[in-house]
Amino acid sequence: MRATLTLFVVFLILALFLWASLSGALFVFGMLFWLILLIITVIYADVALLYLLGAREVRASDEKVFFEAAAQEAYKLSLSTPRLYFYNGTLERSFVLQKGRTTSLVLSKELLDKCSGPEMRAICFELLLQVKRGMASKRTKAMFLLGLVTWVTHTVVGVLISLIPFKEFRKTINWFLNYLLHPFLSFLFSMILGQRYFKKLERYLADFPLEKEMLDQVGLKLRKPFSYYSIPSRKLMELTSINKSKHFQSILALEFLPHEWDYLFMGEEIKRAE
């Protein structure tokens, strides 16, 4: 509900801003842009997120384990078989996107290469459980809103700093933008969903101890949140990203958003196993 309300407020504010600041042909073009964004939000939010992540559809012949795991867990939860994608990112992440009856599972390439068959089934189960419990649609709306903010910010700032002749100064502004943008996105995400979303997911997973145990095994193989959420690690990644494309920076912004694994994989069971 909060995700839908936030999107409604954002589009209302944008419409009022266009109405108050533009006139004539500029107002028509501004409202046309507003209408296109609204259509994308209502109908194609998942497609837009796949674009922002640079996701590519997985072929059954290339990732047989992923296909079999997704089909098996979807059948177990009485869901339709999802579409499967991978993307090239920095962190080991997995996302579930849902719009209407269409469900997509998106995994980082590093995660696909690292996990075995049982571990892949546990990942697919955790993602599809969010669909089964009616949580995935809210998550998709929140990610789309923040992905849109990231894309618009990078685009507008990129156009403005392109007018600056000094390359080093452009890089400094770009890094400073990321320095301010990422914490702001995390704050918005926590306001829209918050840890309550992750706690609810943890309660649902507790009803499936076998899948939860195997998911914990995945957590033992991945880098821990403190290894990339610490100030030095995170700022180093942000500083490195300024030499890469805006698309890469948008992917990194989505990966830095709070993730359920940051919450689930810091539990007492995993700490004892370590």
Image: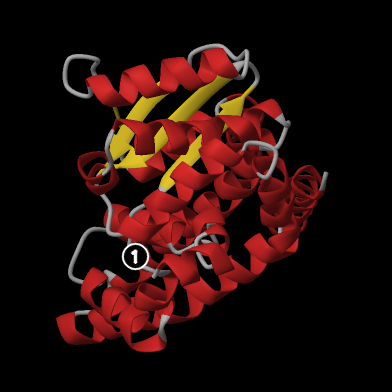
Q: Foreground: 140 or 11?
A: 140
Q: Position of residue 51 (x, y in %)?
A: 38, 37
**Label 1: which secondary element:** helix
Q: Quadrant of the N terminus?
A: top right
- Within the image, what quadrant is residue 239 found in? bottom left
Specify few, some or many for label 1: CA neighbours under 10 Å numbering under 14, 14-19, or 20 or more: some
Q: Quadrant of the C terminus?
A: bottom left
- In the image, taking residue 149 as reference, residue 163 lies left or right, namely left
Q: Foreground: 88 or 174?
A: 88
Q: Foreground: 204 or 102?
A: 204
Q: Foreground: 248 or 235?
A: 235
Q: Position of residue 98 (x, y in %)?
A: 59, 28
Q: Give the residue type that dot 1 points to.
A: Gly
Tell me the residue at 29%/41% (across/down): 87
Tell me the residue at 25%/69% (across/down): 241
Q: Position of residue 158 (x, y in %)?
A: 34, 65
- Within the image, what quadrant is residue 246 found in? bottom left
Tell me the residue at 61%/19% (across/down): 77
Q: Which residue is mark 1?
A: 158
- In the image, taking residue 249 as reference, residue 78 lies left or right, namely right
Tell me the residue at 55%/44% (across/down): 212
| Picture mark count | 1
Q: Position of residue 13 (x, y in %)?
A: 77, 55
Position above or below: 79 against 130:
above
- In the image, taking residue 91 as reference, residue 226 lies left or right, namely right
Observer able to see residue 38: no
